[in-house]
Image (tube, coloured by chain):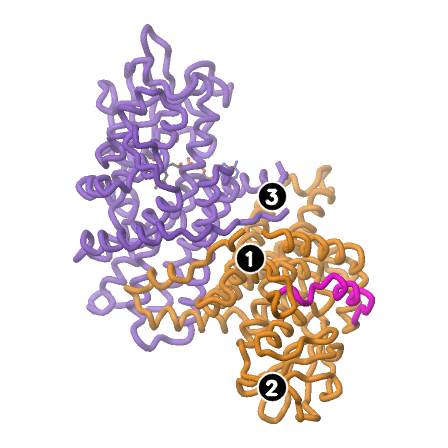
Amino acid sequence: MSDTSELLTASATRLFETRLTEEAVRASRRGDFTADGWAAVEDAGLPLALLSEGEGGYGIAMAEALDLVRISGYFGSPLPLAETMLANLFLARAGLPLAEGPATIASFDCAGKAQQVPWARHAQTIVGIREGTIVRLSADQLSVRPDFSACGLPRDAVFLVHSDAEATAPSPMDVREAGALARILEMAGALRRVAELTLAYANERVQFGRPIAKQQAIQQQLATLASQAAAADAAADFAALAFGGGHASSAIAAAKSRAGEAVGIGAAIAHQVHGAIGFTEEHRLHLYTRALWAWRDEFGNEAYWETQLGDTVLSAGADAFWPHLTGIQVHATEA
Amino acid sequence: MRLKFPPAPQSNAAEELRAEVRAFLAEELAGVSALIKARSWNGFDAAFSRKVGERGWIGMTWPKRYGGHERRNSERYVVLEEMLSAGAPVAAHWIADRQSGPLLLKFGTEEQKQTVLPRIAAGEGFACIGMSEPDAGSDLASIRTRAELIDGGFRINGTKLWTTLAHHAHYMVLFCRTSGTPADRHNGTSQLLIDLSAPGITIRPIVDLAGEHHFNEVHFEDVQVPDTALIGTMGQGWHQVMSELAYERSGPERYLSSMALLVELIRALGSSPAREARIAIGRLSAHLLVLRHMSRSVAWMLEKGEDAALHATIVKDLGALFEQEIPDVARRLVSAEPDDPATQSFCTVLAYTVANVPAFSLRGGTREILRGIIARGLGLR
Ligand SMILES: Cc1cc2nc3c(=O)[nH]c(=O)nc-3n(C[C@H](O)[C@H](O)[C@H](O)COP(=O)(O)OP(=O)(O)OC[C@H]3O[C@@H](n4cnc5c(N)ncnc54)[C@H](O)[C@@H]3O)c2cc1C
């Protein structure tokens, strides 16, 4: 990892730990925006992490910059950091001015409507994609109808009111792929958090005179949870390292499917081990598990991406199966 | 608690080697049936192993003075995964290349290294693992096989069980007790290098449920071996056998055992598969891609000299789930008639794989034992 990446991930971690605590996460689940937290995120320069130096970023490897999204997920993603990082990437690649303030990306239909746009009500800049063209929009060009994701995060409907957008260009990337990539990384981070919470709880909770973590049945469940979290983390690496390269679509498809599956298995174990307390509003476990359940469905669920990947593999045919898969291979970024 | 699987760096040498191995296998395996390929690392073919040895693809990472080739672990990994995915009959040299050779390299005497390793690397010396016994399965420390110290050597009595390849192998790495009693557990155990032609050794076949003979019972009755048979240090057997198990658990064979079936499944699905088949193939491919990424990471950690035991255990556990699930997925997607030529080979490979998958979460450490190791890695025990 480069020094710049290390600095960035360290300052992001510190920032989330100190400025974006559980209160901010709970606020985001009501659709609220922690403005002072966002100011700190901007001060730390996090929204520019995916950009090259020429584009106004730091020139760190894409996969390393994407670690910030994983960190955000670990802390419950209380702010549109992933969305703003990606919006800036889209804008920079299209040669358009970067976002001002929090931003998001929306896919518009021909009637000028975009559905299920994360964080739209709080976004100052919206990257609109319409028929393969990218438009840079500001909040006053849109009307937003607030809605909520399955875990209570803002996920709004957006309508274009003034389409006299000043800046348009061909879209440099696929919105669904980029969005899926963000959710993969957030899932990897949040599932790791869930594993940590569960491990800690199992060591604390005493029944039958000893911590439940001493029961072999619980140990085997925790081993499975840790393995699934590790698989989701590896899947996220795989997708992040492939991003921007020739095999990005297949790698993202594989990772969204695998991470989604890991979430299903892992979150179920976490709740089982937590018992009734984990089923309460008061306990923080749901801040992560409900987000995980929402994220695995957003930007294409497992079946969607499995169909994509399955079609590619099937069209290559039985004898090309292995050569095809080994071709989808990623490498560590140069140190 | 982040169990990070560090991605391997790019290696052009490894990719060139991949092309070489593929060309070799295309020639060697031309016309071989899907059922034979499904045997994969159970497939025994001494002549094939000799050819692999001639190519320099056994003992690849070992020093040249012991017949090795001083190549990188990432290159060795490419050879392994290409052999397995193609269904090459690698059983003869597999165990020796994977664990017996590396164990000797690490703990063996100079004489053992000079006499045995070059034979293994040539694809001519085969080895088997003498760990399990009738009363010592998961609880390996409870072994009863005893090597008594006698003048100039050892006298061995006892029975090893489930010994894969013993009927073809030249050597066994024997894990046995050299002092104390089974109650002493880890203390008083040692490893010996056994020449299986020694008098007093009886090898009885055990036929598995698929009707094949791979494993054996190996009985030792007053078998005398010289003291040069000792591997490493007397009394350090437990410590040594644990590092042998780390070699045993770390490779790509722990998730590729059902590859032949997956390939035949794709063939049987034909040109216009139903939606559920497209989803299922995509899901299995996603698993395979991520497992391979994790498994290559283990190989890379080992190349760097890092301890990858916990990572390897996770890959083996996840890998066995994947290998065992493939037949279950496959049989629901193809309505196969054994008499229909279009699905005949799918049917035979399916039947073979269904009968073999129970072993995948037993051999090399059971699922429960692996999860116990992961739990220990999490600090739970
Ligand atoms: C195909 C095949 C090839 C093999 N080849 C070799 C070989 O070449 N050399 C060799 O030495 N051995 C070999 N083995 C043996 C293998 O290592 C053992 O099968 C394995 O260690 C398990 O031992 P066991 O079969 O006696 O089962 P047991 O140990 O009796 O286990 C039975 C069940 O109890 C569970 N169990 C046991 N202890 C615990 C515990 N503490 N907590 C929870 N559950 C537990 C196990 O997980 C398993 O489900 C082979 C096995 C197979 C199937």
Residue sitting nearer the eye, B49 or A167: A167
Chain A pictured colour? orange
The answer to whether residue B279 is seen in the rendering is: yes
Location of residue B271 by image quarter: bottom left
Question: Which dot, 1 or 3, sits closer to the camera?
Answer: 1
Q: Quadrant of ligand 1?
A: top left
| Mark 1 or mark 3: whose residue is earlier in sequence | 3
**Image-based side of A269 in relation to A29, left or right:** left
Task: Name above or below for residue B257 compared with residue A303.
Answer: above
**Mark 3 chain:** A
| Residue A34 highlighted magenta (yes or no) | yes
Residue corresponding to mark 3: A219
Question: Which dot, 1 or 2, sits closer to the camera?
Answer: 2
Q: Tag 1: residue type?
A: Ala
Task: Name above or below for residue B377 compared with residue B186.
Answer: below
Q: Specify start and end residues of the magenta stretch as a single range.
A: A33-50
Residue corresponding to mark 2: A168
Chain B pictured colour? purple
Residue corresponding to mark 1: A232
**Do marks 2 and 3 both belong to one polypeptide chain?**
yes
**Mark 2 chain:** A
- How far is the residue under mark 1 from the one under mark 3? 20 Å
**Mark 1 chain:** A
**Image-based side of B94 in relation to A83, left or right:** left
Q: Secondary structure at mark 1?
A: helix
**Image-based side of A297 in relation to A280, left or right:** left
Task: Name above or below for residue A153 compared with residue A171.
Answer: above
Location of residue B117 by image quarter: top left
Give coordinates of residue B89: x percent, y percent: 24, 46
Could you classify mark 3 by the number of other residues whose Cα lies within 10 Å: few (under 14), some (14-19), or many (20 or more)?
A: many
Q: Secondary structure at mark 2?
A: strand
